[in-house]
Structures are given as C-alpha cells and as structure tokens.
Amino acid sequence: NAGVTQTPKFQVLKTGQSMTLQCAQDMNHEYMSWYRQDPGMGLRLIHYSVGAGITDQGEVPNGYNVSRSTTEDFPLRLLSAAPSQTSVYFCASSYSPGPTGNTIYFGEGSWLTVV
Amino acid sequence: SQQGEEDPQALSIQEGENATMNCSYKTSINNLQWYRQNSGRGLVHLILIRSNEREKHSGRLRVTLDTSKKSSSLLITASRAADTASYFCATDASGRAQKLVFGQGTRLTINP
C-alpha cells in the first residue's frame, strides 16, 4: 500500500514548455485533488475530481488541465509553463467525502521550477 | 483567498511544554482540519472536526472549534522535538467537493 504517489519529485521547465505531473493512489479513493504551495503560504486548490470521468475547478485553475480516466490516476498538465507556476505541487485523495468531509491523504509533493 | 488565518505565525517553546495554535476563518464551514508538514515533505492529516462538534482529542492533540467565533485551536501537550513542523488549519465549506482553504500556517519549533 503506497498511498499517494507523485512523479516527478523535481522538475525544471523552460517558459512555454508543457509537462504532466503524475499522481496515483492505491487506496481506491473516489476523491482526488491537486494543490499548489508557494513559499510561506498555505495550499491552494487547483482542480479536483469526485470520481472517474468527473473533474472540476478549484481556486487557481488557470494554466492547468486535468483528466480522470481511472479511479487510480489523476494527472495534472501544465499547458504552457510560466515562471508564476514555479511552486510545490501536492496531489491528495480521500474516500467519498459525503456531506461532512473525510480524511485527506497527501502525496510527498513535486517541486517545479519554471525558468 | 486564505480563509484561515493562523496565530502565531511562529512559535518556539521548550521540550515538554504545551503548544497552542489558533485559527480564525470567515465563512460558515462543514468541517475544519489540522495538518502537519515537516520541512520538504507532504502534509499529514492530524484531526478533522465537524461543524457540530466542539472538541476532539487524538493522543497528545486537542482541537476545539467555536463556530460562533469562527475560530479553532490546536493544543499539543508535552511537546517533543519531533513535533517541530509547520501546522496548518484548513476549512471546508463545500461538503462533498472538499475544497479545502488553507491558512498560512504556524511554524512550531521545539527546543531540546
């Protein structure tokens, strides 16, 4: 049971390049999400999914794309990287939250630098 | 937007002392969660307290929630060096969507 696995751990991109951050969970969680954390800040929600085939936007979705073709995987795509997207990205998952929420499990993070 | 505001931003205490961190928020919530983050690592879930609950305990952790004041506190008793980390509160007003809104965190340092 690996939990939430993110790859890559570190990545340097040039402005304008695209890339995909991978996220996989082996806990059969319906809910998955992506957050970014900027220095000295809390996390901000980018996109989330309540099940396979269902995605929605969070607080800061611009410049990012997601899809959820399977329960296990939730990749985050940067369409055209910008220096403002330099951040640490966290994937998270949980069982169906229901009306009152549920424990969320986070991955170890992906450090992205855009130059 | 940072709904949760945490106080203090940094806290340094001696090992064995108790540490109290506070979180205030602005809108009605379904639940409030506390997380720990060690330097360079992911977040670890500590406690989830629902809006109809006032207090929860987990080991050396005690969380209170006052919805009338829109505030919560996290108490760590008998602190240990391993408790050194950043602690974040996160509020969820969305229920099924679990759109957590995080505060900026409290950096806790436990001195041996």
Image (cartoon, rainbow, N blue to C red):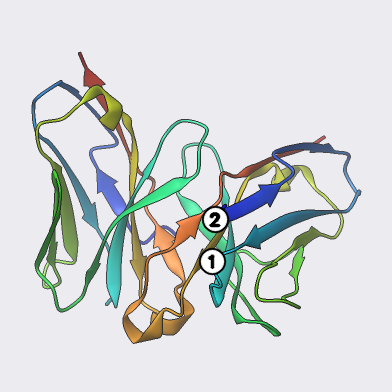
Q: Which residue is mark 2?
A: A1
Residue B49 appears in which quarter of the rendering? bottom left
Q: Identity of the amino acid at label 1?
A: Met
Residue B26 in view (yes/no) = no
**Looking at the image, which residue is at 43% across and 63% down?**
A104
Residues packed near mark 1 inside 10 Å, few (<14), some (14 to 19) or many (20 plus): some
The residues tagged by marks 2 and 1 sit, at their Cα atoms, a distance apart of 7 Å
Q: Residue furthest front?
A: A1
Q: Quadrant of the C terminus of chain B?
A: top left
Q: Are marks 2 and 1 in contact (CB under 8 Å)?
A: yes
Residues packed near mark 2 inside 10 Å, few (<14), some (14 to 19) or many (20 plus): few
- The local secondary structure at tag 1 comes to loop
Q: Is residue B72 above or below residue B80?
A: below
Residue B47 in picture, x, y percent from top left: 26, 58
Q: Residue furthest top?
A: B112
State the residue in front, A96 or B50.
Answer: A96
Residue A27 - label? 1
**Looking at the image, which residue is at 82% across and 34% down?**
A115
Residue B76 appears in which quarter of the rendering? top left
Q: Is residue A81 left or right of residue A103?
A: right
Q: Chain of mark 1?
A: A
> Is circle 2 on the same chain as circle 1?
yes
Residue B98 in view (yes/no) = yes
**Looking at the image, which residue is at 71% across and 85% down?**
A53
- The local secondary structure at tag 2 comes to loop
Q: Is residue A75 above or below residue A83?
A: below
Residue A35 appears in which quarter of the rendering? bottom right
State the residue in front, B1 or B58.
Answer: B58
Label whose residue precedes the other's in the sequence (2 or 1): 2
